Amino acid sequence: MQYRRIVTGHDASGQSIFLSDAAAPRTTAFQHIPGFITSLFWETEADAAIPAPACDPAEVAKSWVPGPNGTNLIFACFPPDSVMTNREFDPIAARDEYMQVLPGLAEKFESDSPGMHTTDTIDYAVLLDGELHLELDGGAMKRLAPHDVVIQNGTRHAWRNTSDKPATILFVLVGARRA
């Protein structure tokens, strides 16, 4: 799947212009988790300024988790959980691919509780299509349908796709300071 990203900006005289109209630069269809696709669309630093920087912040982002007061815009397409329970699934290869593709986020995943992770972010999540379940501590779960919105306040959680179809979700991660 290709995601189109249109970026606006300013010319030398301050007029608004289109800077780019192309596929998002950091989109990965995972080899070891068939159907799992991630895309980092944009990142802002805590001291973001307008006009936008000349470089593409998505291409140079060092982490998929923003620092305090920074933001990251991410799409994720989750395959059905059955992909991970298939006897041919290689969890070591999948972990290695996570570490390579999702720096800063991959390290947050718990090895003894697959999928569970905690980030120092406030996440705005909008399910675009499909069905997902949000799991919290103690196995508490909520089912999400398209257009449901989750405000994820730095809690330990996992996304589960118990259906037989992929689910696409949009995240805005806002970096926070854990008190």
Image (cartoon, rainbow, N blue to C red):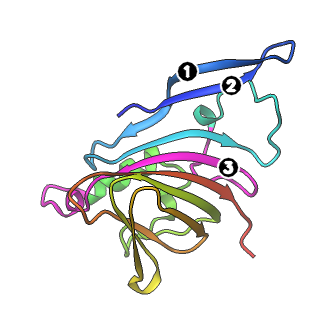
Q: How far apart are the two marked residues, 2 and 3, measured between alpha carbons?
A: 17 Å
| Secondary element at image label 2 | strand
Q: Nearer the viewer, residue 46 or 170?
A: 170
> Quick check: marks 3 and 1 in contact, CB under 8 Å?
no
- Residue type at tag 2: Thr
Task: List the residue tagged with mark 2.
Answer: 8
Q: Which residue is mark 1?
A: 21
| Image spot of residue 133 (x, y percent) | 37, 69
Residue 45 figure quarter: top right
Position of residue 34 relative to residue 138, above or below, is above
Q: Contact, CB < 8 Å: mark 2 with mark 1?
A: no
Pick out the residue farthest to the bottom.
138
Quadrant into which the N terminus falls: top left
Q: Which badge, 2 or 3, comes first in the chain's sequence?
A: 2
Q: Which residue is mark 3?
A: 71
Provide the residue span drawn in magenta. Answer: 61-90
For label 3, the SS is strand
Q: Residue at x 36, y 56 (%)?
A: 95
Observer-nearest of 33 and 112: 33
In the picture, measured across the screen, residue 88 lies left or right of residue 65, that is left
Select label 3 or label 1 by which is in front: 1
Report the mark closest to the observer, 2 or 3: 2
**The C terminus: image quadrant:** bottom right
- Ranked by sequence position, the earlier of labels 2 and 1 is 2
